[in-house]
Image: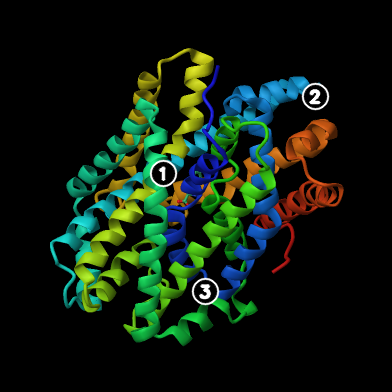
Amino acid sequence: MRSHWSNRWAFIMATAGSAVGLGNVWKFPYMTGTNGGSAFVLVYLLCVALIGLPLMMTEIMLGRRAQRNPVDGMAYLAAEAGGSRWWQGVGYLGIAAGVLILAFYSVVAGWVLDYGLRAASGSFAGMTGAQAQGAFLDFLADPFELLFWHSAFMFMTMLVVAKGVTSGLERANKIMMPGLIAILLILLGYSLAVGDIDRSLDFMFRPDFSRITPGAVLSAMGHSFFTLSLGMGAVMVYGSYLQRHVSIARAAFYVVLTDTAIALIAGVAIFAIVFANHLEPASGPGLIFQTLPIAFGQMPGGTLFATLFFILLAFAAWTSSISLVEPAVAWLIERHRLGRARAALLVGGLVWLLGIAVLLSFNAWSDITLFGLNFFDQLDKLTTNIMLPLGGLLMALFAVWVMRAAHAQEELALNECNYRRWLFVTRYVAPAAIVLVFLNLIGLLPLV
Ligand code: PHE
């Protein structure tokens, strides 16, 4: 007998815990910055609404029907519908994506831990933009420090996964997630008071279509998958621990809403600080580490707020990282009969090693590039822009073309009108959008 969430809130909290993480507070602002602002935000929001929400429902539905890890789950569902066993490849794709994502996710989560300690020591007080930038660059140049924090974060993640004590973490999450939202609102209040909020809103929301490039469209779509944890089986495996009677649509809606709201609040607050301090919005993955210390360093109670902020962000990253390895771990346990601890050690060891290559790509190996991108960028692009949308595309196609309609309907339990909407979007809109964005990128379709 597999274990299940104790109630629907436990499931919603866990799935929101998976969705809300570095993707919202670290990645969304820096991607918005490097992709020119509003056009990226607009495409991202469109993707969240048109692809993200229906696909979140689809993934939960597949997981709950299968009651298995993503590999065996897809094999089981395919067999049930008389489809090919090859569909289990979707599960393998997801496992690989999770491992590769965690390799860089953990390194960045390590930066967050380090910054939590810096914040607590009061080192942000009175920091200028140049000092914040210098401190971050010095930090990146030191592989041993990065290794220490990456290892610490991997240890935290694998400990929770090995013990299967997700319940303890989820209980803590009930306090931590509202806490993160509260601190983000405090940050927003500070930005409203002293930041350049007008330019921030302008940058993020005034449509400027001249900035839409095929690359930006792909990044925005990829990010909508990344931030909602879609396309790799994390949501599917969480859905597989879900009891029968829970409304999938409502759960998916809450998760998508929370995730999007947090990203937008973080973005507006951060760009207000960026513009007020004449910093570069397109400065890349270091954006929040180079801007937030300035803001916290100036505001009253900054040391306390900064420390809390980085602790809460690390916490959000923690609840995401366990969902990144859960598909792999569940597969090793259920298919290969490994104990939970051993499965966690195996997957964690692999991710830890890959993470070392990632952290070296910021210093010792920074010259090793492919198409001008270092290993960190390569992994990020491969997973976010290709593997996740591809996984999501295959899941959507499976749900509407292979699975029996009656089975999907039974799980989703939507009324007739909403069911038709879900079907239309999942059958035509989402697959067409994903395929068009891919074709557009490879230049077969000069749309933008
Ligand atoms: N959604 C998480 C975040 O925004 C990252 C993640 C991606 C988690 C894919 C699971 C699967 O931080």
Of the residues shown, which amino acid type is indicated by label 1?
Thr
How far apart marks 2 and 1 lie (CA) works out to 34 Å
> Which residue occupies the extreme top position in the image?
337
How far apart marks 2 and 3 lie (CA) works out to 45 Å
Where residue 376 appears, as percent x and y from the top left, is 39, 50
Instruction: Work out whether mark 2 precedes mark 3 in sequence or the reverse, and give the earlier one.
Output: 3
Q: Is residue 136 visible?
A: yes
**Is label 2 in a helix, a strand or a loop?**
loop
Left or right: 206, with 182 as reference point? right
Q: Which residue is mark 2?
A: 81
How far apart marks 3 and 1 lie (CA) works out to 30 Å
Where residue 187 appears, as percent x and y from the top left, is 36, 72
Of circles 2 and 1, the one toward us is 1
Q: Which residue is mark 3?
A: 36
Of the residues shown, which amino acid type is indicated by label 3?
Gly
| Quadrant position of the C terminus in the picture | bottom right
Q: Which residue is mark 1?
A: 319
Of the residues shown, which amino acid type is indicated by label 2?
Ala
Choose between 10 and 120: the one closer to the eye.
10
| Quadrant position of the N terminus in the picture | top right
Q: Is residue 268 above or below residue 83?
A: below
